[in-house]
Image (tube, grey):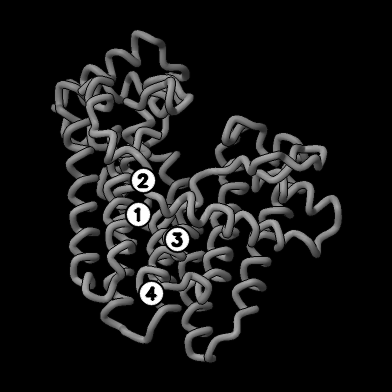
Amino acid sequence: MNKKSLDNIDNNLSNPPDCFDKYRHIIDEGLFTCLDSFTHELKVTMGYHLGFNDQNGKLLDKRSAGKSLRPTLSLLVCESLTSDYLPVLNSALAIELIHNFSLIHDDIQDRDTERRHKKTVWTLWGEPRALWIGNTMRSLADFIQSDIELDSDTMLKAADLLSQASMEMIEGQFMDVQYENRLDVTADEYLLMISRKTGALIRSSAELGALHSLDDKFITTKFRDFGKHLGRAFQIRDDVLGIWGDTNITGKPVGSDILRKKKTYPILLSLDIANELNNVELESLMFQSEISDLGLEKIISIMSDYEVFEKSQKMIEYHSELALDCINNVKDSLSKWGYNQLCHLTNYLAFRLS
């Protein structure tokens, strides 16, 4: 499957739902307020990573950040069930801080010098300060989460959820490091790893939205399952874009994940299903010190022969359909707007172009 396959996606599926714009300023304002109590140096460095200011501390006209998927998901689920997002706001901000703590550490681990088209924290200020900033964000998340006027049972459940998600995410990071030194990682092992590294926070974001809305175990469990499947679809779509994405949209060259030798789902699936001859050829090409343009072309050609793009997208759609099944199971408890936004969000994450 070539780039044309991505170009042919229905625009309605690849456009983000309104909830991203609706909650963006709420999330931005909440995160910015969290930084007020810190010293200038801490505030500048955290503000830089979160996209509020440049490396010298000068505030930007508009926050330069990612999608804020996790807090958006929490707010959307909560408002869909109660017509109010405020009960989950602090937990949503906490989970976004945990996510950003992981990104700072991930950049050090992967030796990435850029994130979102700007230098990473460790590149500008060194590893010790980057670790310090990441750990501060993680601690701040706990502080924000505890600063909520809730009944003790709900607060304890929310705190437990965040701690469990954080532990799973760290376990996933550890598994990812282990996989770097293995040549025999399978696609199934990769799915287990991403269910922790990426999936834990996305799953918990949805579950927290339900937990803060009402005391209903069935609905909370359905949103937990919804988040689990959404997380898998989100990460595998990321992997697809890392190979076949449009350079003009992603800002990355075609095959960027292959060139970086990342063990992503399409690459591991190729190694799983290729015949012995192609498997040996793939391993030989992928584990060279540097992959040439000709080598990249050959790898993508072999992947095309085994319909790896189609199989990867089918896996994305499989988990998206399971996520939608969860939403349909609780449809009667959702506002019409909330139901439509959750369905739109699920399809968007499965078919997004960046």
Q: Amino acid at mark 3?
A: Leu
Tell me the quarter of the picture where residue 265 sits.
Answer: top left
Number of the label disc, if any, that sits on residue 235: 2
Q: Which residue is mark 4?
A: 210
Instruction: Specify whether residue 284 is in view.
Output: yes
Secondary structure of the residue carrying tag 1 is: helix
Report the Cα–Cα distance between label 3 and label 1: 8 Å
Q: Amino acid at mark 4?
A: Ala
Residue 339: x, y in percent?
28, 63
Secondary structure of the residue carrying tag 3 is: helix
Q: Nearer the viewer, mark 4 or mark 2?
A: 4
Secondary structure of the residue carrying tag 2 is: helix
Report the Cα–Cα distance between label 4 and label 3: 14 Å
Q: Earlier in the sequence, mark 3 or mark 2?
A: 3
Number of the label disc, if any, that sits on residue 201: 3
Q: Earlier in the sequence, mark 4 or mark 1?
A: 4
Task: Determine whether label 1 and label 2 are within 8 Å by CB.
Answer: yes
Tell me the quarter of the picture where residue 31 sits.
Answer: bottom right
Q: Amino acid at mark 2?
A: Gln
Left or right: 105 in relation to 21: right
